Image (spheres, grey):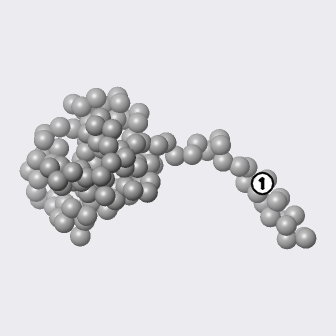
Amino acid sequence: MSETGQEWDEGNPERLYVITRGRSALNRGAAFERSTLDLVTLIVSRSEPQPTMQPEHAAILRICHSPLSVAEISAYLGLPMSVVTVLLADLLADKRVEARAPVPQALLPDRALIEAVMHGLQKL
């Protein structure tokens, strides 16, 4: 069961239409969403859910107290990635969540260096 209390039913596309209010990544600033949000983008909530919020928005704010990837949010909510992207774009526009890029590969230490350090430590 998802955080929102409902699992996505592939036979019920109307529910997804209602959740996104008919919007998609293509009609809501697609360049912004594609460049900012991908499967590994980390999302952190910056505010608490409000009682008047859409349940899916509130669920995202509740589960993102610690950083979660967009893929994890999609899995926890049981919603397709495209729907989660639209919901996150709403929350980003309202500054209720913060999107953080994952650590770039170039900033990670070299594997050979780590292995050399491990072997040096084992010899001690």
Quarter of the picture containing the N terminus is bottom left
Q: Position of residue 55 (x, y in %)?
A: 18, 55
- Residue 84 appears in the picture as rendered: yes
Q: Quadrant of residue 27?
A: top left
Compared to residue 110, the image places residue 35 above or below, namely above
**Which residue position holds label 1?**
112
Residue located 40% across and 42% down the image: 98
Q: Where is residue 71 in the image (x, y as percent from the top left)?
A: 38, 54
Residue located 91% across and 70% down the image: 124
- Residue 54 appears in the picture as rendered: no
Viewed as shown, does residue 20 lie left or right of 49? left
Say which element carries label 1: helix
Furthest residue toward right: 124
Q: Position of residue 123 (x, y in %)?
A: 90, 70
Choose between 14 and 21: the one closer to the eye.
21
Compared to residue 62, the image places residue 87 above or below, namely above
Mark 1, residues whose alpha carbon is within 10 Å: few (<14), some, or many (≥20)? few
Choose between 81 and 98: the one closer to the eye.
98
Residue located 31% across and 58% down the image: 62
